[in-house]
Image (tube, coloured by chain):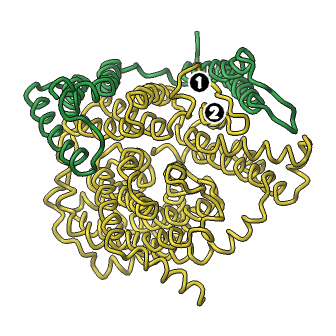
Chain colours: A green, B yellow
Amino acid sequence: MLKNPKEFWSGVMFAVIGFAFAIIVKAYDYPMGTASRMGAGYFPFVLGNVMGVLGLIIIVQALLTSGTPISKFAWRPLIWVLSAFVIFGLTAKLLGLAIAILLLVVISSYGGHEHRWKEAIISSLILAAGSIAVFVYGLKLPFPIWPEFFG
Amino acid sequence: MEQLIAHLSLGFGVALTIPNLMYCLIGCLLGTLIGVLPGIGPVATIAMLLPATFTLPPESSLIMLAGIYYGAQYGGSTTSILINIPGESSSVVTCLDGYQMARQGRAGPALATAALGSFFAGTVATVLLAVAAPPLAQIAFKFGPAEYFSLMTLGLIAAVVLAAGSVVKAIAMIVLGLLLGLVGTDVNSGMARFSFGIPELTDGIGFVAVAMGVFGLAEIMKNLEEGEEDREVFLNKVTNLWPSKQDFKDAWGAVLRGTALGSLLGILPGGGAVLASFAAYTLEKKIAKDPSKFGKGDIRGVASPESANNAAAQTSFIPLLTLGIPPNPVMALMVGAMIIQGIQPGPQVMSERPQLFWGMIASMWVGNLMLVVLNLPLIGMWIKLLTVPYRMLYPAILVFCAIGVYSLSNSPFDVVITAAFGFLGYLFVKLECEPAPLLLGFILGPMMEENLRRAMLLSRGDVTTFVTRPLSACLLAVAALLLIIIMLPAIRKKREEAFVED
């Protein structure tokens, strides 16, 4: 069994990402050039390999030492917060800022420990009104306030 | 001397115009407002508020950002003292004695000492910055691409010293940052790298998206996971603000030492507010006749780290403004802001845009003054903020982040990228990978590649150019020395101890 999972998986992460960069350079045929005239692929190829090797070193170190386990992933905040954020991005233009903020606040509020419907709705209304006042009317950011099909 | 006065008067001429004073004020207030919120440090604060400054003229935008930075720092120490939660890592040590003072009913004097100490340190450091910047910039003009490359290497290695956890991991994080920074169009050949046919990626990954994802979103998710603790807030006990005569007597030496140490550590690449506050606290404890009082509400334990972190925050602008090299993540964000404003950071800023340069320096002092004058009376308002439960706060923070990121390019793309970096940042938290080196690497990636290419072109592909040019060799030697020192077992242990409280 892994005695130092935190280090081990960090090493795996670095090794995978690092070598992936190096492989992409080769796979897409980014020009390497020479040391005196470096092509687009030179620096990333070197860096990718350096990072991959660092990852391998961390893996070896992890196998020789023992450490603390990785604490459990809290999927609940992770999923609700990130999906609320992405949904905001996708709806901001289409549905307008007002509805996008409403969705963002209500969806992300599921990520917390206790979820209170009324509170979430009220704070979303306040936040939507406040943001529209500050960002659309104040800073003149080009956001539509209402859905496009409302005109 | 005359030149100094001429420079400063030029600067104050810019900083004291009504609009710039307003932006400085807004920056300080916004910075404090968000800095007071627990779990959001200056990096996330600046990343969050950065888009709001894009439409301003360059001078005003940088003045406002600097104001946000000081405000966030100041807000951080407020939460340290009042609820024992450092708003940012440079006020971690302030918790030790500041919170104890608050428990003894002396929150007022603790807050006032922090503010006055910071103001004194800020004033000294601003003068130092004004004196040291011109000669340093002269040296910087002698730098060729090889020297720049070596200097950046030194800066990145120094960032490792500050990262908690394993050294190899911190270096790997730097390299990851460098690689992510290379995504997008290669300036030399015009070739799109790592963009996989996605048109938005040919412009590169936005550094706001990276900073906000890794520092902002990841923090929120981490805080949500930990759940709401019962915070003991000393609301009603902040009645008497003014420190007693005895307090002044006890604190002034600590303020002086903190200022000196902080100013020095801020200049070093990789140095900065965090290191300065730790070092200053340790120094105070070492030289005190009665070290047993530390940790039990000794005023020196508040005065010294708070002065040090503010001095360092100020002097860390020196490498940024003279060399164009950010010594810490906050400065990396400032570089990003400058580039967006069309200013290439470096020694030429001082000669080509003296108004921007000296205006910014003058506004630092003005910002510090504003914080003292405004925040001490406003302390009651900041305290009220602390009583708002986190479940109400975080959706509001998310809204600001989302609007900020979206308005970068008015497309959903940056929002999605930010969410992706939020996930990555959460992974880093789980794997205990310190994200600060990544951000530095990310900003420096393209600059390093460019200077490496030029240096190699000039030397016709001879790598030894980096060690045969004396200046470059010195810089690399220092970097190597640093690396060896932090790898030494004894130092390594000390370093781990220093981060335990983090």
Residue on which disc 2 sits: B185
- Name the one closer to the observer, B495 or A95: A95
Quarter of the rendering containing residue B346 = bottom right
Locate residue B461, reporting x and y percent.
90, 40
Q: Please, which residue is most extreme toward the front here? A: A151
The correct choice, above or below, for B160 with respect to B134 in the image is above
Q: Please, which residue is most extreme toward the top here? A: A1
As drawn, the label of residue B195 is 1
**Which residue is found at the position 88% from the left and 51% from the top?**
B467
Q: Please, which residue is most extreme toward the left here? A: A118
Amino acid identity at mark 1: Ser
Relative placement, left or right, of B133 versus B117 is right
Label count reads 2
Relative placement, left or right, of B272 versus B412 is right
Are marks 2 and 1 in one subunit? yes
Q: Chain of mark 2?
A: B
**Which residue is found at the position 71% from the left and 30% from the top?**
A44
**In the structure shown, which secondary structural element does the residue marked by tag 1 occupy?**
loop
Relative placement, left or right, of A3 versus B232 is right
Q: Chain of mark 1?
A: B
**Which residue is found at the position 90% from the left and 47% from the top?**
B459
Residue B126 visible within the image: yes
Q: Confirm or deny contact between disc 2 and disc 1 (CB under 8 A).
A: yes
Quarter of the rendering containing residue B272 = bottom right
